[in-house]
Amino acid sequence: MEMPNLIDMPRRSYERFLHEGLRELFDEVSPIEDFTGGRMELTFGEYRFEEPKYTETECRDRERTFAAPLRVRVELLVKESGEVKEQEIFMGDVPMMTKHGTFIINGAERVVVSQLVRSPGAYFTAEIDPATGRKLTGAKLIPNRGAWLEFETSARDVVSVKVDRKRRIPVTVLLRAIDTEEGLTEEELGTDERIVRLLQEVDDNEEHHYLDSTLAKDTTTNKAEALEEFYRRLRPGDPPTKENALALVETLFFEDRRYDLGVVGRYKLNKRLALVDAPEQRTLRREDIVAIIRRILDINNGRGTADDIDHLGNRRVRSVGELMQNQFRVGLLRMERVVRERMTITDPDEATPSALINIRPVVAAIKEFFGTSQ
């Protein structure tokens, strides 16, 4: 039997980062607007790599890093005048992989080891209640990037949820907060009737009324109240307003810059919940959360089984390209903050892409990635 080429996977992974991953990242942060959103807009266009300054041999001999300069076309739109200023910006040196699947950093050859991580998606657990001996179902919704959702069933039949390991709230508060339908006001959305309609079909246990118990624990009665309660639990100390609460829910689950299931996460979620009609979108949908709660009630009522979290089918390999993409994103987001701050204090007529962009956070993120042991 012929041995597979073991360095082929990291090489293909890094190639994907260089040709597709960087494009995804630049699209993710574009356009960058000032804090008011009314003065300037900065967009990243096409990018290219120049030839590395030194060869692999020279890098080893001179204790240099084998890297290629990255240049990006950047457009700055001054909204008031409509003027567009375009420049090609140097975004730092990106280390290149050798044909052996290694990197040469300051003359030393380094290898980035792939990680075996829990795959994003929904996982269902069943824990024995020590007092009653009953199996109580929980679930974890793990994204590639963003807030975790952890569901659990109490011995008193209340189904609750924790967002990003913060305080626990009845799951009906979350359902009310994300309820939506055109033509209805926030007072008409998220009512008990609408919640019951979603879940009554699977809440059919004569002895344990999960829906009734959860609604009894829930002090809210509609979407407007649920949004305030949700905000209060996640941001204790901040006075909740309707706008703040709505913005919090949107950014936590439905904004692709903050929440990303990833291609793998969306595939696993669709498969586990049998979401045939689910699109390929990588943010959450209201239907996903409803389907998870319905599955929890199903397993509580003896229909369906929990998952084995340690099964290798529930794990995936995170290779060098994905690890580098995650690190590069950190640098770009730090740079984005600097750009927005500079936009606020710079005169639009004098502003240029090179004056607004500071590449130091990106360079530092790359250096940090290859400078740490992994």
Image (tube, rainbow, N blue to C red):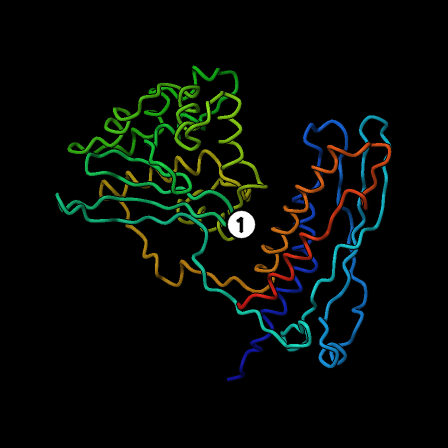
Q: Position of residue 185 (x, y in %)?
A: 48, 15
Q: Position of residue 123 (x, y in %)?
A: 36, 49
With 229 as the anchor, is 266 left or right in this view? right
Q: Position of residue 332 (x, y in %)?
A: 66, 49
- When asked about the image quadrant of residue 295, the answer is top left
With 152 as the anchor, is 75 left or right in this view? right
What residue sits 52% from the left and 16% below the top?
183
What residue sits 28% from the left and 47% below the top?
304
What residue sits 71% from the left and 33% below the top?
34
- When asked about the image quadrant of residue 234, the answer is top left
In-front residue for pair 336/321: 336
With 179 as the anchor, is 247 left or right in this view? right
Q: Is 245 rendered above or below residue 336?
A: above
Element assignment for label 1: helix
Q: Is 364 rendered above or below residue 354?
A: below
What residue sits 27% from the left and 44% below the top?
137
- When asked about the image quadrant of residue 213, the answer is top left
In-front residue for pair 207/30: 30
In-front residue for pair 297/133: 133
- Total numbered labels: 1
> Residue reaching furthest left?
132
Question: Local crowd at mark 1 within 10 Å, few (<14), some, or many (≥20)?
Answer: some
> Residue reaching furthest bottom?
1
Q: Position of residue 374 (x, y in %)?
A: 53, 67
Which residue type does callout 1 highlight? Gly
Residue indicated by mark 1: 262
